[in-house]
Image: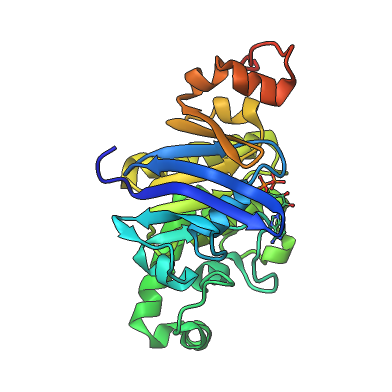
């Protein structure tokens, strides 16, 4: 792949004696929508944590936009154009949806965090904040939920909270978005809508999205370009949904040796 947006090479992460991620290598191209899939505990979130700088890898390297980011802090990596969400949604529960979009995500504070909070209280006083407010509304439009703008996030369903979390990750106009199980626990129709919207956003803006999901049947039908399959800390295979569907090793990892081929559900 020429000029990948993300290049992970020989990534390994040990926790004491446990090898959570072992020799993982893959690339993500510009404008690619890629699924990262695998059974519980196979190392998906740990891979994200190493890529985004939250954990130091034991071995291996991570390049983003052609730059080695292996030794950078999360905020430095974010400043290059990468944003991630977490498996457990972290929203400001006593704020409205639009206010949540205006505040940078927890754990990724820039130096201007306190200024942002202050400006949030008197937005009309600050042209940059007015621009940010317009951006927040346009993100809600992109996700097709403008009507949620003034709801308190504490009143949202789990699925709606996940949407707000995705919306917030889009506020900084990232070039690379890492989403950790954004539809876990989300009802089927809303989950499909979220994938559909992400597909459109990728196509319209050219950003790259790497999305963790652990339901194989589900991801096979959601319009991703490519799927990376992990098992027990390692990459089992990478390929198009059709290639993954027909791969015996994948079938065995998911269903046991006697498994039937994975079929699309009606
Ligand atoms: N901070 C940590 N300290 C020790 N062990 C950890 C830590 N984080 C993850 N692990 C272990 O590393 C392995 C991989 O965990 P990880 O969270 O990456 O899996 P996952 O594929 O994201 O699973 P899930 O689908 O359940 O979210 C697991 O055995 C987990 O218990
Ligand atoms: Mg995980």
Find residue 194 and report its horizontal and vertical position in percent: 55, 42
* Rendered residue at 39%/43% (across/down): 28
Up the image or down, 123 lies above or below 51; here it is below
The image shows residue 262 at horizontal and vertical percentages of 64, 16
Q: Specify whether residue 181 is in view.
A: no
Q: Residue furthest left?
A: 2
In the displayed structure, 217 sits above or below 179; it is above
Q: Quadrant of the C terminus?
A: top right
Residue at image x 64%, y 64%? 151
Which of 215 and 199 lies nearest the eye of the viewer?
215
Colour scheme: rainbow
Q: Position of residue 187 (x, y in %)?
A: 70, 39
State the residue at coordinates (39%, 63%).
69
Residue 69 can be seen in this image: yes
* Looking at the image, residue 86 lies above or below residue 206: below
Residue 105 in the image: x percent, y percent? 55, 69
**Image-based side of 93 in relation to 180, left or right:** right
Quadrant position of residue 188: top right
């Amino acid at each position: 792949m020429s000029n990948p947006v993300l290049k992970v090479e020989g990534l390994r992460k040990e926790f004491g004696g446990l090898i959570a991620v072992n020799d993982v290598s893959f690339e993500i191209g510009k404008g690619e929508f890629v699924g990262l899939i695998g059974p519980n505990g196979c190392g998906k979130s740990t891979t994200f944590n190493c890529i985004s700088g939250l954990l130091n890898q034991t071995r291996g390297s991570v390049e983003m936009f052609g730059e080695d980011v292996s030794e950078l802090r999360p905020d430095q990596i974010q400043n290059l154009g990468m944003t991630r969400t977490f498996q457990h949604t972290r929203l400001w529960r006593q704020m409205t949806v639009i206010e949540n979009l205006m505040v940078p995500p927890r754990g990724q504070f820039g130096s201007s965090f306190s200024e942002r909070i202050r400006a949030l209280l008197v937005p009309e006083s600050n042209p940059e904040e007015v621009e940010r407010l317009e951006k927040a509304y346009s993100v809600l439009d992109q996700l097709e939920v403008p009507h949620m703008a003034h709801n308190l996030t504490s009143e949202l369903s789990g699925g709606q909270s996940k949407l707000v979390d995705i919306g917030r990750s889009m506020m900084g106009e990232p070039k690379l978005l890492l989403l950790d199980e954004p539809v876990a626990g989300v009802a089927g129709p809303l989950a499909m809508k979220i994938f559909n919207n992400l597909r459109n956003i990728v196509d319209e803006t050219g950003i790259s999205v790497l999305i963790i999901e652990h339901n194989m049947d589900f991801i096979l039908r959601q319009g991703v370009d490519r799927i990376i399959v992990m098992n027990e800390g390692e990459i089992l295979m990478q390929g198009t949904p059709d290639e993954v569907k027909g791969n015996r090793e994948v079938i065995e990892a998911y269903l046991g040796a006697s498994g039937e081929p994975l079929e699309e559900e009606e």
